[in-house]
Image: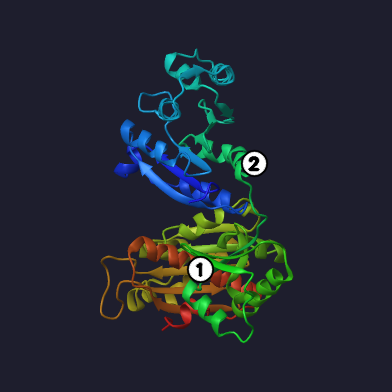
Amino acid sequence: MTNTDIHLLLTGDELMSGDTVDSNSAMIAQALAAQGQAIAEKITLGDDRERLVTALKRTIDNAGVMVMNGGLGPTQDDLTAELVAAAAGVPLALNQEAEKHVREWCAARSIEPNDANLKQAWLPEGAAIIHNPQGSAVGFALQVNRTLILTTPGVPGELRAMLPEVCERITHAIGGGAVHRVRLQTFGIGESTAQALIDEDAEPWPEGVVLGFRAGIPQLEIKLTTDSLSPDVRHCRATLERLIGDHILGEDDTTLAGALQQTLRSQGKKMVAAESCTGGLIAAMMTAEPGASAVFEAGFVTYANSIKHSVLGVDPTTLENEGAVSEPVVRQMLSGALKRSGADIGIAVSGIAGPDGGSDDKPVGTVWLAWGTINDMQTLKTILPTDRAMFQKLVAAAGLDLIRRQLLGLPKLPHYFSRRAI
């Protein structure tokens, strides 16, 4: 290990028991990656004094920086300040700047600071505070021999607000490389397929551009990383556009719903959703994005057959003869939604989310989708054999993407359905 290594120590019984899922280490790692740094080692420990002090002492002199996350609050199990002081061999002392912060935080909430609040102002002697714009507990920085110890609270919102100062202190202590990163958000293509297309491409991939993937549901993030903004990065971006362009939604934090909203807005159109098996998830995804009122007209959740008839005008005879999960029904659902809302384009879905309700003809995971306009309506049947929650997420996401594709004139049968469509 070199003295430019960054170590991360996460503390808290709740992390060990599983009551709290660790998202802070990912947040810290992403912030560091943006400035060309990486975590060399990560340790998670409960609120055990002996183990924590041992971990701190082992790290001192073996790391350039130790970021300690958690244990800065007012309660008895918030041990960070005490334990760092013990590991450094210094006493706790009342930090006037930290005390001022605690008192101002309490005053802003019209409360009188008690001993528990003021406990947060006792820091290892010689520590400098790391400002906390949101919470009562400041972080602190303490140089111990050759290791800079930086402490941060476990509350994610507070950590996020403090990370710029934390990263600045790390860069000042050990330096950081200039890194340029392009993040592309995609939908409907897996990392193995994307990698295979790149590997099989006639144009060689430049050695100076690192290709990375971050898989999620429903999107896949593709990252291009290099030491500088070079022509190679732009060339690789163009290569991805050529190979998988119809799957690219946008850059940075673009969502599927956000990409669709942008397309609708640019074309001056509004959409509608008629949902059965997704239970309103399509509408929820659209309205979760700011600006939805300009492009999203209505969402109909017509779960029961009687509501499909009374709200959307689906023919009862069709429902009886064809079943709710059928092409004629989703066509009528979409037609009814478009007419009742006045929207320009829409999506209708009806399927069997499971775990029950399937048959030999229509097994669990079967879904029919209809999308488009009154005069240009497309339909598709597919089977997605997965659990109920995942089924709903995939169907809802596909519904948004199918509208996006139609508006942009992209291939009607995307990769993710080309092997499943029936």
Which badge, 1 or 2, is on the more N-terminal residue? 2
Tag on residue 266? none
User: Which of these two is toward me, 147 or 298?
Assistant: 147
* Mark 2: amino acid: His
Q: Quadrant of residue 258?
A: bottom right
User: Which is in the foreground here, disc 1 or disc 2?
Assistant: 2
Where residue 50 sits: x, y (%)?
31, 32
Label 1 element class: helix
Question: Which residue is rendered at x = 49% and y = 40% of the image?
Answer: 67
Query: Dot 2: within a 10 Å radius of its alpha carbon, few (fewer than 14), some, or many (20 or more) residues?
Result: few
Residue 242 visible to an observer of this rendering? yes
Q: Quadrant of the C terminus?
A: bottom left
How much space separates mark 1 and mark 2, taking CA atoms?
A: 48 Å
Where residue 120 sits: x, y (%)?
47, 22
Query: Dot 1: within a 10 Å radius of its alpha carbon, few (fewer than 14), some, or many (20 or more) residues?
Result: many
User: Which of these two is toward me, 336 or 17?
Assistant: 17
Residue 277 visible to an observer of this rendering? no
* Mark 1: amino acid: Gly
Q: Which residue is mark 1?
A: 399
Tag on residue 172? 2
Label 2 element class: helix
In this image, 290 relative to 360: left or right?
Answer: right
Question: Which residue is rendered at x = 52% and y = 63% of the image?
Answer: 273
Where residue 134 sits: x, y (%)?
56, 31
Above or below: residue 106 compared with residue 357? above
User: Which of these two is toward me, 142 or 215?
Assistant: 142
Question: Which residue is rendered at x = 42% and y = 23% of the image?
Answer: 74
